[in-house]
Image (cartoon, coloured by chain):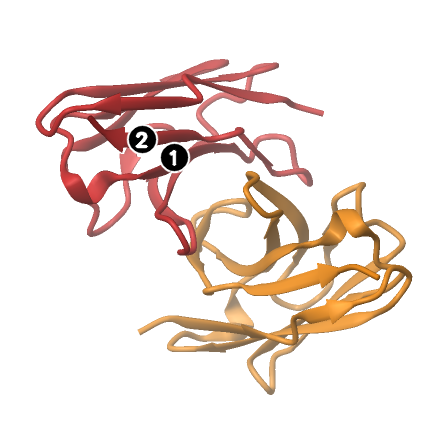
Chain colours: A orange, B red
Amino acid sequence: EVQLVESGGGLVQPGGSLRLSCAASGFTFSSYSMNWVRQAPGKGLEWVSYISSSSSTIYYADSVKGRFTISRDNAKNSLYLQMNSLRDEDTAVYYCARDSWRSSGLFDYWGQGTLVTVSS
Amino acid sequence: DIQMTQSPSSLSASVGDRVTITCQASQDISNYLNWYQQKPGKAPKLLIYDASNLETGVPSRFSGSGSGTDFTFTISSLQPEDIATYYCQQYDNLPIFTFGPGTKVDIK
């Protein structure tokens, strides 16, 4: 069974940093591209970042470019999101989502999410 | 960037009703359009990919159609467990993946 379990969320002050993790199991993690998608309280879904299976290709939404860094450790079956210079508007539930084997941008499995709250 | 719109933003229907949601892209995205279901407090779930293909395990009462800029998502017979918010999402415009604003579906 495919499982994605996020962790690392919490309360952080504006300008602060946080590192999210996503532990994957039930599939060959090193064969799949991965993504982070977020959802502000009461709002819709916003794609944040993409990383290819070998980490050779990385994309970011304009809203986080230069502040967030996506990475992965295939030996540990883990995906990460380093978030720096956090702003109030980064407050959201952050989901890791697996790309389907069919195509990038087709998110076939999601974790349960971890809440990041940016507030003073 | 490609913008996605959905209508209606919310709807209320009776059990057994046919429910239709539309999604429009600001430019041609061929059939690179997916539909997700998100129940309250839960993660999104993929229902339809490439505009009209049913994801494995998803009930056949869900369907999708369309291409280019105009797409439709249909629940043929609304069930109580279908209460959720439904999102369309384009993946034609790599590397930006854009979601629609969502349609909240309630039981009347």
Residue A84 position, x and y percent, is 86, 64
Distance from Cα at disc 1 to Cα at disc 2: 8 Å
Would you name the residue on which mark 2 appears?
B105
* Residue A120 visible, this orientation: yes
Q: Which residue is depicted at the point 11% across and 28% down? A: B77
In the image, what residue type sits under mark 1? Tyr
Residue B73 position, x and y percent, is 31, 24
Task: Give whichever of B1, A8 is nearer the camera.
Answer: A8
Task: Give whichever of B46, A44 is nearer the camera.
Answer: A44
In the image, what residue type sits under mark 2? Val
Would you name the residue on which mark 1 appears?
B86
Q: Are marks 1 and 2 in contact (CB under 8 Å)?
A: yes
Judging from the image, mark 1 belongs to the subunit labelled B
* Residue B6 falls left or right of residue B16: right
Judging from the image, mark 2 belongs to the subunit labelled B
- Lower sequence index among marks 1 and 2: 1
> Are marks 1 and 2 in one subunit?
yes
Q: Which residue is depicted at the point 55% across and 59% down? A: A95
Q: Which residue is depicted at the point 37% across and 77% down? A: A26
Task: Give whichever of A89, B36 is nearer the camera.
Answer: A89
